[in-house]
Each structure stands twice: as C-alpha cells, then as structure tokens.
Image (cartoon, grey):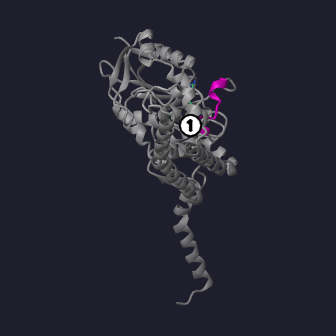
Amino acid sequence: MFLNRRKLFMMSSAAVAGMLPTYKAWAKLAMDLEPRGTEGRNERLPTLDLESQQHFFTEFRVWINRDMVRAAEQRSFQVLKEAGIDPNGELPKEQVINMFTTDPIMTMHTTAWERSQVQMWASVRDAYHAEKDRYLEEMEKAEKAGPGTLEMSMGDNIPEYTKHEIHLQPGGYVGDPFAGVIYLHGQNVVFNGGNYQDNAQLKYAAAIPLPKGGQVKRIHEPGCSIGQLSQALKERFPEAEVWGTDVGAPMIRYAHMRSVDMGVDVNYRQVLAEDNKFPDGHFDMVVDNLLQHELTREAILAMYKENFRTLRPGGVYYPIDLHTGSPKPRTAFQKFQAWRDHRWNHEIWRYEYESVDKAAELRKIGFEVIEKGPPARVGSGYNIVAYKPA
Ligand SMILES: C[S@@+](CC[C@H](N)C(=O)[O-])C[C@H]1O[C@@H](n2cnc3c(N)ncnc32)[C@H](O)[C@@H]1O
C-alpha cells in the first residue's frame, strides 16, 4: 500500500486517539501510591523488585515461624532437661530469659526473625520515601474526597507512649508520613502473607455479636490503623455510620484514601482511645483489634471507661487481642517468646497489657461480661463480650 504523508499523519492521529483512554488510565495510575494497579482489596507495591523482596521476606518468615521455631522449642526442652527442670512447669520470667538468651540455637532463631523484620520494613519505607513528593501530593488530594470523612486535629499533642517503633516499624504509627502504606505491606509479611486481603478483619467483623435489641446504627473502632476492620464492619452493616479512630494521623490519612479508592463510606478521626470526644451513649457497638497490647495499663483502663460511656444501654463491646480469648503464655518457651516479642519486637507495653485482668476490670466499670463469647482469632477458642446493661 502506498502511503502519502497526509495518510500517514491521519493514521498516526487515529492511533493516538485510540490509545488515549489507555494513556488516561495509565496517567491516573501513575499518580497513585502504587502505580502497578490493584490486587483485590489492595494496591500493589510500586515496583516488581520490591514485590519480589516482600515475597522473599514472607517466605523466610514462614520458615522461621514454622520450622525454625520448632527447632528452638526442641532446644529449649533440651536446655531445661540438662538443667533438671520440667519444661511444662512454672518458671519465673527472669530465669527463662537467663537460661535461653545465651543458647546459640535459640539466639539464631531470635536474630534471623528480628533482622529480617528490620530489613523488610526498611525496604518498603525506602521505596515510598524515594518518591516522597509525588505520594504526599496524592495523599493531600484524597483528604477532601469522599465517601467518608477525615478529621486530623491533634497536632503535636501526641502522648510519648504512642511514639515507640512497635514491631520495629520505622517511625512507628505517628512519626512517618507514609506509616499507613508501610503498615499495609509490612503487616501482611508479619502475618506470614495471610492478611493481604484483610482476611483476618473480614472474619472478625463477621464474628462480632449483635448488641441487645439487634439495632446497629453507629459503630466505633478505636485504634483502627488503616481501616481494615472499620471497612469490614461497614460492609457487614451497610446502614450503620462507622467511625475508625486512631492517634496516628498518617494511619487514618491512608485509611481514608484507601476507603475512598474502595468506595466504602467510613469516617476517620484522630483521637486517643482513652479520650475519644464522642457524646455519651452514641454507639451501638465498639470493637478494637490488636490495640490493647500496644497501650499502657493506665490507657487500657481509661479506654474501657470511655467505651462504657460512649455505648448506649444494651450496646456491645468486643475486644480482640492476644489474650482476650486465650490463656497467657505459660510454658518456659512461651514465656521466652513473649519476652522476645517485648524486647526484640519492641512490643513495649505487652507486659502492662498482660497485667490487666480484662473481665474483672470491665465488670468493675459496670459491663456485663461473657468471658467465653464467640471467638474471633484462630485457635483462641472464645472471646470476651461485654454489654452495657440495658
Ligand atoms: C496493631 S494496630 C491496630 C490494627 C487495626 N485495629 C486492625 O484491625 O487492622 C494499633 C493501632 O493503635 C493505634 N494506637 C496506639 N495507641 C493509641 C491510642 N492511645 N489511641 C488511639 N490509637 C492508638 C496505633 O496508632 C495503631 O494504628
């Protein structure tokens, strides 16, 4: 076919016009925090290389948590046996720490686990900081978009105890502008790759018992992080007004952006769980997940009071955490794992959390407590359910 310059020009114009929708879609994605599109409920990591690294960290962690932990446990039995101690007996925490920290096999387990976690967080953080301006601009744009609202008003009034780099996340929940998206990808590795589609939160939302009378008009999730549970609650109760609150502005900023992207109508507010600013009797349901073990004892007890105050008569409080449905660590090895979590995973407040007798404290405030309510977490058997008397 003979092509003159005019025909050639018309053909190339048509080709560009045909490609325009694709280009526009690409341009939209390129402005997104993860320009490689979405996978189910979440946007993918910004580069294939980073995604491969995260897969490596996940598989390494699965190996550590499955095979290596068994080797460490076997070794702990051996160490105790050599010392003539019953491995299932009650040993003081200090004795457990002294006996196990110098053992090379147990130390190797702790070190491999801790070092890989540090590197995992750093690789995600570095990727978002490398494109800082572009990502910050995008987050700013999303602030005014709906559905749902975003309120961030605490400024510098952030209590010191919330500033720790819990589970080694660099900058923690309040000190890095990208804490939300870093948490999204990191928590999936921490959960051995099993939570990328909010798997746990969807299951928990389904498990929560109804309040007395069955009516669910307003729900509150204190310590909502990036809104995975708040969104799952909105999906279970589409007619309800759902509020996710958190001390971390970067967390709820990302939570809001994620809810906007998914078209899920959740409201986010930056407040402390122990001083949430909502009116008395406002909520039918209050749920928290993995918040309490990151609070001081004082804050936990203050939050219980706040939850009681803001629930309507007959309202339900469902706390989900490490031992709201399972016994505290008992064997020497379990105690060592708990200490490792506190010391090396920077779970600073873990022992304060364990010092709280949840059912007794909730009763003192006035809740009617069912200690063996329906379970949320796998393997926990049961979960505390607390009702404000009707
Ligand atoms: C492990 S995350 C919670 C996960 C989340 N609930 C979920 O289901 O995915 C703990 C969250 O609690 C928040 N937090 C810690 N102390 C707080 C406080 N005193 N008040 C409100 N939020 C707090 C942290 O900023 C963090 O986002």
Q: Nearer the viewer, residue 128 or 30?
A: 128
Q: Nearer the viewer, residue 125 or 257?
A: 125
Quadrant position of residue 30: bottom right
Quadrant position of residue 201: top left
Query: In x, y percent, where is residue 19?
Result: 53, 67
- Mark 1 surroundings: few (<14), some (14-19) or many (≥20) residues within 10 A: many
Q: Is residue 22 left or right of residue 177?
A: left
Asked whether mark 1 lies closer than 8 Å to ligand 1, one says: no
Q: Residue furthest left?
A: 213
Evaluate whether residue 143 shows in this view.
no
Query: Circle 1 is placed at which residue position?
Result: 100
Query: In x, y percent, where is residue 325?
Result: 39, 27
Query: As displayed, is residue 15 above or below residue 364?
Result: below
Which residue occupies 47% across, 48% down?
193
The quadrant of the picture showing ligand 1 is top right
Query: In x, y percent, where is residue 121?
Result: 61, 46
Query: As displayed, is residue 262 above or below residue 325?
Result: below
Q: Residue furthest bottom?
A: 2
Does the stretch in magenta take in 135?
no
Query: As displayed, is residue 54 above or below residue 216?
Result: below
Chain part drawn in magenta: 158-168
Q: What amino acid type should be assigned to the residue bearing mark 1? A: Phe
Does the stretch in magenta take in 161?
yes
User: Which element is circle 1 on?
Assistant: helix
Evaluate whether residue 66 shows in this view.
yes
Q: Is residue 66 left or right of residue 122?
A: left
Picture quarter with the C terminus: top left
Q: Is residue 195 left or right of residue 215?
A: right
